[in-house]
Amino acid sequence: MSTNKPEKVEGIVLIPGPSRDYLNERQRVAYESHRRKLLKWLARQGKNPDALEGYAHHTARNYAGIIDRFLREIWECDGYTIDVSHDDAEDYLRSLLLADDEYSHTHLHNTKLALLAYFRFQGDEWEPDITISSSSGVSQPRDFLSDDERTALREAALEYGTVPAYAALEPKERTKWKRFLARRYGKPTSDVSRDDWDRANGFKYPSIIHTALDAGLRPIEVGRAQTYWVDVENATLRIPEAESSKNEDNWTVSLRRETTEYLARWLEERGMYDKYEDTDRLWLTRHSNPYSASSLRYVLDAVCDLADIERDVSWYAIRHSTGTYMAREEGLAAAQSQLRHRSIETTAKYDQAPVEDRRDALDRMG
């Protein structure tokens, strides 16, 4: 009898038996490397990557098992891969919901959380079209911004990050604002120039927020956005299939003329910054990185504060509101194209009357 014990990382089996049996030797080597990184990430920073806080051991072990079973299900259909899509995750969740063996809500909820963690590990963000809670089962779409909140966000984006006019400040006040800009840009106060003043009142943040409100951009799409997506003349974003977050088709997304003007101003301003010299990325953080869900969360929280939106708002609330109001104004086909959904069934969840419309209906009903 063999006494070989399976290798463990962070106290979790590196490759479970069924996966080891399925893979050939080369695939096992590749999966072992991937899995080793995943297990360390779950245990050391998966819960809160920014704070380097990992999951509790039992949670990390549970999620690792769920992710392994999910990948094995993909392999059965498409062969070995670790590059999975949001649609793969949606289909897997639906298969569990419709399975003959009824899974508990707790298991379904944990499966969703484990898959969310896996996409974060991959540097991606996934917002399931199916929402599952541990106690109340499946529910339909999440929160979205009201009409008034969308307007308030647009207006607050024009104020976010601005500083008083240089010439309007007394020397003492100007020194205070120089210190503020020095902290923002990570440079000595003596190095803060008029260019930094102009940069603080630039068009990056208005272009990000307004484009997201128009196009319902996912966080990963903000990070991936390229300068050549922007068609100023026709007021559109043109997203190539290879750069679409779900890699399904070329997409042409409508923009407001106001948004296009902010983008045009930003494209001109962008050329002034050295960090954009060797990249076509449309937006980079002040640390020269593509935007992620966490860096966008920081921006959105600050803009919401300026807009006096006194509740927790996720980036996806922007996308949900775009879908809801586009479906109301122009129908599901328009919302499907604007949100870049492959299936009209995915868009159908936005076919619901916003709160203010239902209130108006009640007033008319008497």
Image: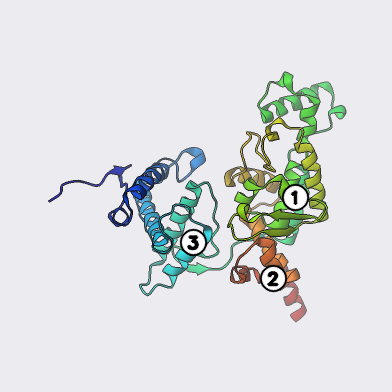
State yes or no: discs 1 and 3 in contact (Cβ < 8 Å). no
SS class, disc 3: helix
SS class, disc 1: strand
Q: Which residue is mark 1?
A: 230
Tell me residue 185's x, y (percent): 68, 29
Q: Residue at x 49, y 51 (%)?
A: 119
Q: Residue at x 32, y 55 (%)?
A: 19
Q: Which mark is residue 333?
A: 2
Q: Is residue 366 visible?
A: no
In the image, 305 versus 204, the foreground residue is 204
Q: Amino acid at mark 2?
A: Ala
Q: Which residue is mark 3?
A: 88
Q: Is the C terminus in the top left, top right, bottom left or bottom right quadrant?
A: bottom right
In the image, 297 versus 86, the foreground residue is 86
Q: Earlier in the sequence, mark 2 or mark 1?
A: 1
Q: Earlier in the sequence, mark 1 or mark 3?
A: 3
SS class, disc 2: helix
Answer with the quarter of the image where residue 79 lies: bottom left
Residue 162, above or below 34: above
Residue 218 horizontal side relative to residue 325, left or right: left
Separation of residues labelled 2 and 1 (CA atoms):
23 Å
Q: Residue at x 72, y 65 (%)?
A: 325
Judged from this view, the residue extending furthest toward the top is 190
